Image: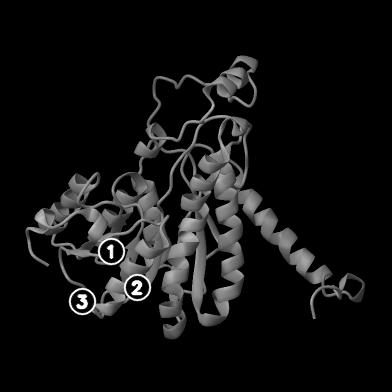
Amino acid sequence: MSSNWLEAGPAANRKGQILTGKQSDQGETSVLVTGSSSGFGEVIVKTLAGHGYHVFATMRDVCGRNRDAAQALMSWAQTNDASLEVVEMDVADDGSVESAISSILEAGQRIDVVVNNAGIAAAGPLEAFDTAQMAHLLNINAIGPMRVDKAVLPHMRARGSGLLLHVSSTLGRVLPGGGGLYPASKWALEGLAESLLYQVAAFGVDVVILEPGSFPTPATSRAMLPASEAIAQEYAAAGAGVRRAVEPGPDYVLPDLQEIGDAVLDIIQTPSGGRRMRYVTGPIFTEGVDEFNQEYEATKLRLIEVLRRPDQAITWGRR
């Protein structure tokens, strides 16, 4: 790829292009990370590339709104002699995802790990969002990761190995009051990812869910606002579903985004067969979630055992 890639045509005509920093050595483990332009994604990319992984950092519009972010990652990779390539990909678009994955595989490279990180936030009462907004957010936060997984799975199943990691949220497991469209989308992601885990295990592919607590990321300031401001104001006036703000103490320290990068690195470095389904990380909105997950696993195993009984057999449905 020419070094003056930023001067090439418009992003709309460049789906799936690879902006090469340093080509992959076929002995390296290759990781594809979605939503790499900022926040969790940027930290994950730099952490993995800094530890010797070949990283495909994907993002939308690399020649437009994310031009500076793409260029900054490429510069960082050059400075740190990191193995990294920026790839144009929009997880909300079938064609974009298929083009991006195809461009990597057709170049003779492989994808060992996918980190499904791309997502958007939303703030406001559910009633105030219109259904188009709901569909848009679910398409990115829940269907988007499945879109990427579906594009990569034939490659992983053929090899008999791979890891699909999904960045969810502790709000996708436990609602500490309030709730909303964003937590609902993460609950949907958790159900899809767990279902996928059971179905692809026979092919040697691992599926993991990472549940961060609350972290200060750019996504928070760019949260989708509801279409109906009037309805949102009615809820605010009634104090309905609103969590009371707490002033931090004098010694308060903001959560460090590097915790996410380190958690992803630890999961990838854990050998297949030793990975858990769910991991929790962060100091805020995490209390008790690990224990909840452990109790869920115990309840699930108990239910599986009960379903083996003749009186619990399911005999109806399509034959």
Secondary structure at badge 1 equals: strand
Q: Which residue has dot 1 on it?
A: 56
Mark 1 or mark 3, whichever is nearer to me:
1
Question: Marks 3 and 2: which is nearer the front?
Answer: 2
Left or right of 5, for residue 228: right
Front residue of 56/43: it is 56
Residue 276 is situated, as x and y percent measured from the top left of the image, at 54, 64
Quadrant showing the N terminus = bottom left
Q: Residue at x 28, y 72 (%)?
A: 104
Of mark 1 and mark 3, the one earlier in the sequence is: 3
Residue labelled with disc 3: 25
Label 2: how many Cα within 10 Å (few below 14, some 14–19, many 20+) = many
- Answer with the quarter of the image where residue 303 lies: bottom right
Numbered mark located on residue 92 in the image:
none
How many numbered callouts? 3
Q: Amino acid at mark 2?
A: Ile
Mark closer to the chain start, 1 or 2: 1
Label 2, on which residue? 111
Residues packed near mark 1 inside 10 Å, few (<14), some (14 to 19) or many (20 plus): many
Identified at 65% across, 23% down, the residue is 240
Residue 95 or residue 201, whichever sits in front: 95
Q: CA distance from mark 1 to mark 3?
A: 13 Å
Mark positioned earlier in the residue sequence (3 or 2) = 3
Q: In which image quadrant can residue 80 be found?
A: bottom left
Q: Where 143 sits versus 66, above or below?
A: below
What's the residue type where badge 1 is placed? Phe
